[in-house]
């Protein structure tokens, strides 16, 4: 049975989104440098278990050396592995990039498809990568569940799930469609600044009054002191 969202909860969600808009603006931005859709696709494949900053350093030279999708499709795997070595998991990533580029050239005429089901047929592309492409390139409402979105959405009480796909579906239910792309951009900024995994700055956070994690901690403290 689908759980209905109460009016109070809807107002809380709305207040959270308004504050995110206010603090982080509603400007769309992509943290991975790219000039073409296929460059973004390769950058997202490289970003698995790696920081965006590191990927941007690597792609600066990589996209100078491999100027076209064909250059990646027919690349020497060992050489590509060396070129992307510092992003980690370089053997798998090199293999996937070559397979992905080949399929884009041979099946999609060198274009990056916009449909989720097509994107998911590409090597190294899961829902997260596919949704980055759909949101950033095609402006299709899509929710990207990365490490920040996963952690902070739980703290905000938007989901209780662990599995990224289930989190994505939960977020689709609670967030208005016009915030699907923005939410990820804003939450990444929030997760890199105030709400880091190691040291969330709850006292300084503008979401403090609305955050479920803070509320739960306060309740637990109250219960412990009244025992
Ligand atoms: S109040 Fe704390 S846990 Fe909640 S979003 Fe802000 S920093 Fe994160």
Image (tube, rainbow, N blue to C red):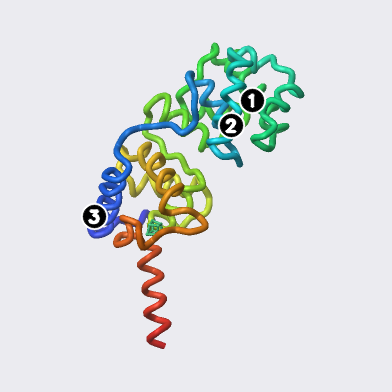
Residues at circles 1 and 2 in contact by the CB criterion of under 8 Å: yes
Relative to 168, is 65 above or below? above
Contact (CB < 8 A) between labels 1 and 3? no
Residue 59, given in percent of the width and then of the height, sits at 58, 25
Left or right of 153 in this view: 47 = right
- The percent position of residue 210, horizontal first and vertical second, equals 30, 60
The numbered mark at residue 196 is none
- Of labels 3 and 2, earlier in sequence is 3
Q: Is residue 8 left or right of residue 195?
A: left
Q: Find numbered disc 3 in the image and state the secondary structure of the residue it sits on.
A: helix
Residue lying furthest bottom: 227
Label 1, ligand 1: CB separation under 8 Å: no
Disc 2 element: helix
Residue indicated by mark 3: 11
Task: Say which residue label 1 marks.
Answer: 97
- Within the displayed image, which quadrant is ligand 1 positioned in? bottom left
For the residue pair 30 and 10, the one nearer the viewer reads as 30
Q: Local crowd at mark 3 within 10 Å, few (<14), some, or many (≥20)?
A: few
The relative height of residue 41 versus residue 187 in the rendered view (above or below) is above
Residue beneath label 2, please?
A: 45
* Residue 130, horizontal then vertical, whole percent: 50, 31
The correct choice, above or below, for 145 with respect to 162 in the image is above
| Location of residue 221 by image quarter | bottom left
Look at 59% across and 16% down and name the residue there: 64
Mark 1 or 2, nearer chain start: 2
* Residue 106 seen in the current view: no
């Amino acid at each position: 049975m689908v759980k209905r969202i109460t009016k109070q909860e809807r107002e809380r969600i709305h207040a959270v989104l308004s504050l995110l808009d206010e603090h982080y603006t509603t400007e769309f931005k992509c943290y991975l440098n790219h000039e073409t859709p296929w460059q973004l696709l390769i950058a997202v494949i490289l970003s698995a278990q790696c920081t965006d900053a590191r990927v941007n350093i690597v792609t600066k030279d990589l996209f100078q050396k491999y100027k076209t999708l064909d250059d990646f499709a027919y690349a020497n795997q060992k050489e590509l592995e060396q070129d992307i070595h510092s992003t980690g998991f370089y053997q798998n990533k090199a293999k996937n990039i070559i397979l992905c580029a080949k399929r884009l050239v041979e099946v999609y005429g060198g274009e990056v498809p916009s449909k989720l089901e097509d994107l998911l047929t590409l090597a190294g592309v899961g829902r997260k990568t596919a949704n980055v492409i759909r949101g950033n390139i095609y402006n299709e409402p899509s929710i990207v569940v990365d490490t920040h979105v996963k952690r902070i959405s739980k703290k905000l009480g938007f989901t209780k799930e662990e599995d990224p796909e289930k989190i994505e579906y939960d977020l689709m239910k609670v967030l208005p469609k016009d915030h699907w792309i923005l939410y990820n951009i804003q939450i990444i900024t929030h997760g890199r600044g105030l709400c880091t995994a190691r040291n969330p700055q709850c006292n300084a956070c503008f979401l403090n009054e609305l955050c479920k994690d803070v509320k739960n901690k306060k309740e637990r403290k109250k219960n412990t002191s009244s025992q």
